[in-house]
Image: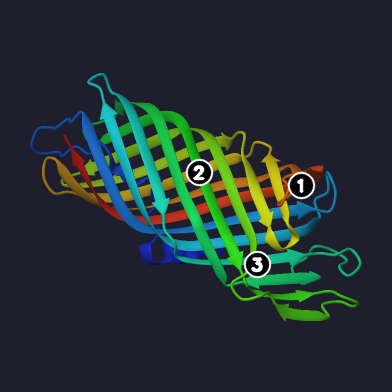
Amino acid sequence: MKMYAKVFGGAAALLAAWPAMASAAVMSEPAPYNPNFSFVGGVGVIDIEANELVYQAAGSGSKRSHLIWESTSPVISAEMTARSEAGWTAKLSGQIAFSGDSYMEDYDWNARFSTNDGWNDWSDRSRFSETDLDHFYSATAALGHDFQVSDRLLINVNGGFKYTSVKWTAYGGSYVDRDVGFRDSVGDYPGGAKVISYQQKLPVALAGIDATYVQDRWNFGFALKGGTTFSAGDTDHHWMRDLRFEEDFESAPVLMVGGSVGYQYNERTSFFVSGSYEKVFTARGDSKYYDIPTGAETGGHDDSIGGDFAAATATVGIKTSF
């Protein structure tokens, strides 16, 4: 996957599930300062990829269509943490990405021309360099508890919920199609014409740990979380065909991993660099079709579609405690 090289190559695999993974840093000297609240703000780059799949039939693993949506965009993040004297924590955090560089490819395997769904056996291919990231945002709420393992090591065990929404629109583009024969039709879509829009909505229940190790003024964070999607789905508009697809996914496993390095500037303020990787694994689902002008349902298929999602983020930022 191209996002690994883009985000982690320059950062030398500095990973963090959120910019605040260096939370609750405590200086060895002087005596520990234990604030009740902290705020983290960060800016960076996010690399996003979503795969949209249509299968040949219910229960089949052979693809009929595969759309790959990608973006590399600037991102801002924020997190607020409240901590009780008994060690309980409550966190609210979020990310918003802005328009950056986006791209989409659409592959089809027509049974008359393709013997399998291998990448070299496609019958139709469209490429859309003029693709916009319409929006990307995520929000997380989590409750946890701190465990002071040693003077230097703090572990927070936590669980909560996350919601992510991402949407793209592809314009113009070029195509290689099959008409009478195999890949015998080549052309371009009208410049600037809206061709396909795709949105994923991903609620996730998650649980995991955040660990912080302090050495003098430096702190090192690591996070590992797992979970599952629930009530996830997508909406797919094919504007030139006047078709809208509403699709519901089955539950899928989710993995989040990250780490950070921070420097404690003073008692209340620290600076950090961090990175994270999140993967929502492929889930299958059901699809219903609607006519865009009238909104009338025109058909549907069970167990006929699938999708996945991944995001890699690198950020720098500041944390303040009070």
Residue 105 appears left or right of 102: right
For marks 3 and 2 on the same chain, the one whose residue lies earlier in the sequence: 3
Residue 16 point in image, percent of width and height: 38, 48
Q: Which residue is mark 2?
A: 164
Q: Residues within 10 Å of mark 3 (few under 14, many from 20)?
A: many
Q: Which residue is mark 1?
A: 289
Pair 1/3: label in front: 1
Q: Which residue is mark 3?
A: 105
Task: Check disc 1 and give the amino acid type.
Answer: Tyr
- Residue occupying image coordinates x 28% and y 39%: 23
For marks 1 and 3 on the same chain, the one whose residue lies earlier in the sequence: 3
Q: Quadrant of residue 208?
A: top left
What distance separates the C-alpha of mark 1 from that of mark 2?
24 Å
Q: Give the vertical position of 103 relative to 261 (above or below).
A: below
Which of 301 and 188 lies nearest the eye of the viewer? 188
What distance separates the C-alpha of mark 1 from that of mark 3?
22 Å
